[in-house]
Image: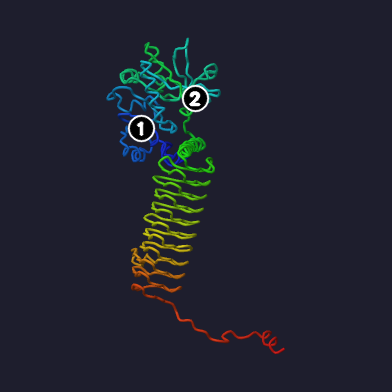
Amino acid sequence: MKSPLSKVLHPVAGIPMIKRVVQTAKDAGATEVRVVVGENEDLVRQVVEPMGAICFVQKEQKGTANAVLSAQIDSLEGVVVILNGDHPLIEPQDLKKIVKDFYESSGDLALVTLTVDDPGHYGRVVRHQGQIKAIVEFKDAGHEARKINEINTGIYAVRSEVLKEYLPLVKSENSQNEFYLTDLVTLASENRLKVEAIEASPHLAQGVNTQWELALVGKEIYRRKIKALMDEGVVVIDPDHTYVESTVRVGSGSVLFPNVHLKGLSQLGNRVVVESQSIINDSTLADGVVIKAGSSIEQSKISFRSQVGPYAHLRPGTEVGEDCKIGNFVELKKVKFGSRSKASHLTYLGDAIVGEDTNIGCGTITCNYAVDHKKYVTTIGNHVFVGSDTQFIAPVTVGDYAVIGSGSTITKNVPVRGLAVARGRQIIKENYVPKAPDQESEENK
């Protein structure tokens, strides 16, 4: 991957790939999920242990058989499914089918295989008279073996007693001097155990070893999500250039323009419109909300039929009421913005409470961060008119129906129905600028 980040922690469509694999196992009904960790152990633990997975450390990187052996297999019971942490495209229904097919085969060991035109560097499945005899890794395969088109996906189902008996017998007699899990197939075959192949869908073989492959699997997961949304009545204008993470919910009749990115636990109601270049993260949008182009919404709530943007920024802790207008180049941070209020353009409101039916003029700012490094609250009531280019020096409170004159710097509370004007008096001095000689001669003509 040529990255300081552990491969399995790289995000695929917003979620670390190891988290996707663990979640798939849980959703498929696994009674226990064990994760073998090596490098970046602490970071991997932080991702999978909150999901209920149990981590086991492979102290030395001695191959896949050694990795599985590190998971304390003596305590396993029933059917064991072995998955790769870098195969994020596997889905719960895939895993359920593998387990179902394994039970129906009454086998001892099953490997998931795929027949392809170009087997590349995958391990080859070697058969004799139709029976599986071995898996040969590409690096150890001879010329004839490399002609085989049936490949090993790296996914196995095995009875726990078979795993316990034969896995410790795997040896490291190969070019890498590693203990290959694939050698378990050879041992099972040699001991006349029933080894079966379960035919896979192509996506099960798609692992991630490069940044290019990471982008490809991410694109596929985005495609699946977009397809599911469109099946539920969401309008996606350009499916190839719309990015919705799998944890996001979008109501029917909503419209997503190209280059929209919906992230995290965002929930969009019905008939929501999100225009191009907008990013919405961990936010809730009620029915009928319109997000205009280039807006960024983070950990915020927007109520029924409100409009945001273009080029607006709603930062964490912001709550916008119904039928509001948050216009272009407006930034809100930790603001409760009342229903039917407006901040139409070029405004910053931070740590503020704004009432209903209030108009915030262009260029208004709340000065919420003080020299003592603390943040203070500005409270603006209902039906307030705030003129353009106003600064509120928090903490300050403006009563209902008050009017703030344009260009004011408000440092004191304003009473209900009061008028506050805090600006220098206009002074005019005539002929303040002396005339240039050419102007005087022109006037004397």
Quarter of the image for the C terminus: give it: bottom right
**Residue 124 on image: x %, y %:** 49, 20
Residue at horizontal 69%, vertical 84%?
438
**Label 2 to label 1: alpha-carbon separation:** 28 Å
Q: 160 or 166, which lies in front?
A: 160
**Residue 1 visible, this angle:** no
* Secondary structure found at label 1: helix
**Residue 271 on image: x %, y %:** 45, 47
* Secondary structure found at label 2: loop
Residue for badge 2: 122
Residue at horizontal 45%, vertical 32%?
89
Q: 398 or 265, which lies in front?
A: 398
Quarter of the image for residue 27 reads: top left
Residue for badge 1: 27
Tag 1: residue type?
Asp
Asked if the residue under mark 1 is in contact with the one under mark 2, i.e. CB atoms within 8 Å, the reply is no
Q: Is residue 149 above or below residue 332?
A: above
Quarter of the image for residue 6 reads: top left
Mark before the other along the chain sequence, 2 or 1: 1
Numbered badge on residue 66: none
Q: Is residue 13 above or below residue 400?
A: above
Q: Is residue 148 above or below residue 293?
A: above
Question: Crowding near pointer 2: few (<14 within 10 Å), some, many (20+)?
Answer: many
**Residue 328 on image: x %, y %:** 49, 59
